[in-house]
Amino acid sequence: MTRSFEPDATDRAILRLIQKDAALSLADIAKEVGLTPTPCWKRIRKMEQEGVITGRVVLLDPEKVGLGVSVFVAIETGDHSAPWIEAFATTVAKMPEIVECWRLGGDVDYLLRVVVPDMQAFDSFYRRLTAQVPSLRKVTSRFAMERVKSTTALPI
């Protein structure tokens, strides 16, 4: 894959800072990387335009917002046709409990990360998922006991 934008050391320093705290002021970012605000803003804007920066979000503590149960759901399907894949993606997009969905190589076709308040909510989610998605060969759920590490920051 060809990249059209190659971040330099200053761009990487900016990215490391805003990955840790997207609420930093432009003045603080510029000062930290040794620039004035205008050139710093231009670099950030270019990285947004190039798709390097895809968004800015606030991260929530799932426990404190009542979503303390995390479940990893492995899916094996018997249908790999384009219409099935499109229908599956549409169904997944409509289910807010699914916070991540990965298509995998190997014995499992998809891995979902699901967040729910409790087991009853997961059971309801599971029933909706299996009712709405045809041709599921196997659905295996693994319940997280402890979050050992969780970060959205890439190691740049």
Image: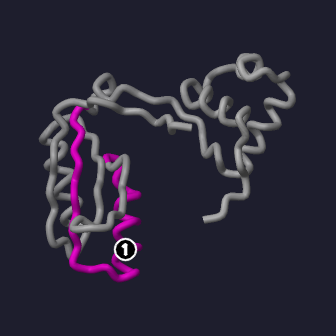
Quadrant that contains the C terminus: top right
Q: Residue 152 at x, y = what percent?
A: 46, 36
Left or right relative to 26: residue 125: left
Left or right relative to 63: residue 14: right
Q: Quadrant of residue 31?
A: top right
How packed mark 1 is, by other alpha carbons closer than 10 Å (few <14, some 14-19, many 20 or more), is some
Q: Please name whichever residue, 147 or 87, is drawn nearer the observer in this view of the structure.
A: 147
Q: Is residue 52 magenta?
A: no
Residue at the spot 63% in from the left edge and 34% down from the top edge: 15
At numbered mark 1, what does the secondary structure look like: helix, strand or loop?
Answer: helix
Q: Please name whichever residue, 155 or 97, is drawn nearer the observer in this view of the structure.
A: 155
The magenta segment? 68-97
Query: Mark 1 sits on what residue?
Result: 85
Asked if residue 40 is positioned above or below residue 141 in the image, the reply reads above
Residue at the spot 32% in from the left edge and 22% down from the top edge: 64
Residue at the spot 34% in from the left edge and 77% down from the top edge: 84
Q: Residue 155 at x, y = what percent?
A: 51, 37
Q: Residue 93 at x, y = what percent?
A: 40, 58
Residue farthest toward the front in the current orientation of the protein: 9
Q: Quadrant of residue 128?
A: bottom left
Left or right relative to 22: residue 69: left
Q: Residue 38 at x, y = what percent?
A: 86, 28
Q: Amino acid at mark 1?
A: Ile
